[in-house]
Amino acid sequence: MDRYFPHWFAINALLVLCDAALGFHIAPLLSRFGKGDPDSQPLTASAIRRLLALMVAIYMFFNCLAYFRGNSTLLVLVTIVVILDILFQLVLQWKVKRGGLQ
C-alpha cells in the first residue's frame, strides 16, 4: 500500500484540478437561478468561484496531510469526497442544461 502513495496523491491532485475546472465553468450557470437582482449575476458567479478556490485549498490541504503523514484512511476519504463533489457537479450541470433546476 505504501508504494502506491505517491501515485494516489498525484491522482487526487488531478481529481481536485478537474473538480476546480468543472466548478469554474458551472458557476455562471448556477448564478442564473437566484431570486435576486439580475445585475448581481456576475457578482454571484465570482462569489461561487471564490468559494471554489477555498474548497480546492481545503481538499489539497487534507490530501497533503494524508500523504505526508502516511494516513491511507484520510487519503481514501479525500478521494471519495472529491469524486462525490465531481459527480454532484455533473448532475447539477445536467439538470441546469435540461432546465429542471428552478
Image (spheres, rainbow, N blue to C red):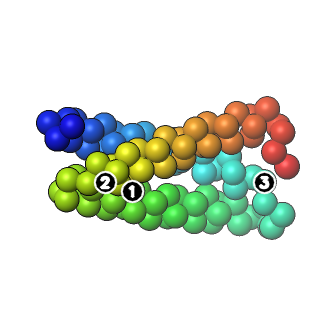
- Residue at which label 1 appears: 59
Q: Dot 1, crowdedness within 10 Å: few (<14), some or many (≥20)?
A: many
> Disc 3 marks which residue?
33
In the depicted structure, whether residue 18 falls above or below residue 51: above
Whole-percent x, y for residue 82 in the image: 46, 46
Residues at marks 2 and 3, CA–CA distance in whole angstroms: 33 Å
Kindly indicate whether the residue at mark 2 contacts the one at mark 1 (C-beta within 8 angstroms).
Answer: yes
Residue 69 horizontal/vertical position (percent):
19, 59
Up the image or down, 19 lies above or below 58; here it is: above
- Residue 33 visible in rendering: yes
Name the amino acid type tagged 2. Answer: Asn
Asked whether disc 2 touches disc 3, contact meaning CB atoms under 8 Å apart, the reply is no
Q: Is residue 10 visible?
A: no
Nearer the camera: disc 1 or disc 3:
1
Q: Please identify the quarter of the rendering in which residue 38 is found.
A: bottom right
- The CA span between labels 1 and 3 is 27 Å
Identify the residue shown where x is 82% and y is 37%: 99
Quarter assignment of residue 94:
top right
21 sits to left or right of 9: right
Kindly identify which residue carries mark 2. 63
